[in-house]
């Protein structure tokens, strides 16, 4: 092992000792192959298509890439989320950033500038009590061999004491940010998971999911002008217009318009035994997770939602705008509870394309059925 890497590992070890309050952590890695991807033992891929990295989360976590962000969560009822985002350095940012150099001091200065100007304000906007820095202001870590800085702050969000950890690294004219948000109650319990996520992160070629992860019967009976976009592995039937493309690269069932990538997906969620919540609370938990992604912005378009019915089951309809990574999307979301699970049927489009496909989406929702 190279001397520089060994030194960084020692520094990283001191960081973990701080997080665990003197508990020694040893991470042992072995690999298992799945298709063209190699998964670290006990981990699962949590990376969106096109991302030039691989984010993995433990298998006892839930993957969440439905909103175009690589990430996952441990519990929906208690904040415990991790995400990875790439922020291209804009000309405006470039004019304010310290000049690039090989010196560690400048690495810290550039990462610190991004943290102070782009990440910290998003937490400050969520709390009225202010934020406090935890431990050392800036801790050196490695992000797959790239010198990076970890920042740790604590803040009260609504009634919960929250920890926010940001790992900021610079590569290929962009900042890569690993964001971890967790309640004080779960912080120490999940710290080993967080460390494992950070250790297993890899830069890589843009992720292209293996095609045909699931089978769909192209000859199945369907309403006129539509085709089946799901199979017998799930307890519902999703039908889409015949000119929509079925997305066979995801584990969830989804379809999209080839011209502009407007899409409809169905995301099931089974609450754990200690998660007693209704549809409205489930939506609020999802909304809270989305807002804790750095730079995210959320705007409801139909108040508190509207009561509707889908597939013969009562549901709630929500419409909102969500911005992430500088891009705004418009969402129509129908959430139903059925046989002990929540089903989240979501239409996503750029605002200028939303109305263009709303007729098709209404037909999709009308044809949707539980089995």
Image (spheres, helix red, strand yellow):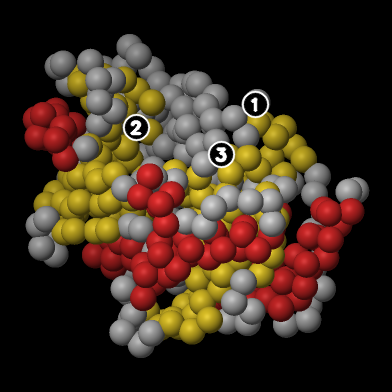
Residue 290 in view: no
Estimate the x, y position of residue 184 in percent, counting from the top left.
53, 80
Q: Earlier in the sequence, mark 2 or mark 3?
A: 3
Q: Are marks 1 and 2 in contact (CB under 8 Å)?
A: no
Q: Nearer the viewer, residue 65 or 364?
A: 65
Q: Earlier in the sequence, mark 1 or mark 3?
A: 1
Q: Are marks 1 and 3 in contact (CB under 8 Å)?
A: no
Foreground disc of the pair 2, 3: 3
Q: Residue at x 33, y 40 (%)?
A: 266
Q: Residue at x 21, y 37 (%)?
A: 350
Q: Nearer the viewer, residue 117 or 46?
A: 117
Gap in Å between the C-alphas at discs 2 and 3?
32 Å
Q: Work out whether 149 lies above or below 72.
A: below
166 sits left or right of 9 in the view: left
Q: Secondary structure at mark 3?
A: loop
Q: Secondary structure at mark 1?
A: loop
The image quadrant of residue 35 is: top right
Kindly identify which residue carries mark 3: 172
Q: Earlier in the sequence, mark 1 or mark 2?
A: 1
106 sits left or right of 98 in the view: right
Kindly identify which residue carries mark 1: 35
Q: Work out whether 307 lies above or below 87.
A: below
Q: Nearer the viewer, residue 81 or 217?
A: 81
Kindly identify which residue carries mark 2: 254
Q: Secondary structure at mark 2?
A: strand
Gap in Å between the C-alphas at discs 1 and 2?
21 Å
248 sits left or right of 193 in the view: left
Q: Residues within 10 Å of mark 1 (few under 14, many from 20)?
A: few
């Amino acid at each position: 092992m190279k001397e520089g890497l060994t030194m960084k590992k020692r520094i990283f070890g001191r960081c973990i000792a701080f997080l665990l309050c003197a508990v020694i952590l040893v991470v042992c890695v072995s690999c298992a192959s799945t298709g063209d991807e190699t998964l670290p033992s006990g981990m699962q891929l949590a990376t969106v298509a096109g991302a030039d990295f691989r984010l993995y989360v433990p298998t006892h976590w839930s993957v969440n890439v439905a909103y175009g962000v690589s990430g996952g969560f441990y519990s929906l009822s208690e904040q415990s989320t991790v995400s990875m985002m790439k922020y291209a350095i804009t000309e405006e940012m470039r004019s304010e950033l310290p000049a690039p150099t090989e010196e560690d001091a400048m690495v810290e200065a550039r990462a610190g500038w991004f943290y102070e100007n782009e990440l910290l304000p998003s937490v400050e906007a969520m709390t009225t009590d202010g934020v406090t820095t935890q431990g050392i202001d800036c801790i050196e870590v490695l992000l797959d061999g790239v010198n990076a800085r970890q920042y740790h702050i604590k803040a009260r969000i609504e009634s919960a004491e929250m920890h926010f950890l940001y790992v900021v690294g610079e590569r290929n004219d962009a900042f890569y940010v690993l964001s971890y948000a967790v309640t004080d109650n779960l912080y120490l319990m999940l710290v080993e998971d967080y460390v494992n996520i950070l250790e297993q992160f890899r830069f890589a070629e843009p992720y292209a999911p293996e095609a045909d992860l699931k089978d769909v019967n192209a000859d199945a009976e369907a309403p006129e002008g539509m085709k089946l976009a799901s199979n017998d592995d799930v307890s519902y039937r999703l039908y889409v217009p015949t000119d929509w493309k079925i997305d066979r690269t995801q584990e969830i069932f989804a379809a999209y318009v080839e011209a502009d990538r407007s899409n409809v997906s169905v995301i099931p969620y089974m609450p754990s035994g200690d998660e007693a919540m209704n549809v409205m609370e489930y939506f609020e938990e999802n909304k809270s997770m989305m807002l804790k992604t750095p730079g995210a912005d959320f705007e409801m378009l139909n108040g508190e939602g509207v009561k509707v019915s889908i597939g013969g089951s009562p549901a709630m309809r929500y419409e909102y705008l969500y911005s992430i990574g500088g891009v705004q999307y418009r969402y129509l979301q129908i959430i139903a509870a059925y046989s002990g699970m929540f089903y989240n049927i979501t239409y996503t489009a750029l605002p200028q394309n939303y109305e263009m496909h709303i007729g098709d989406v209404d037909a999709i929702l009308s044809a949707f059925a539980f089995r």
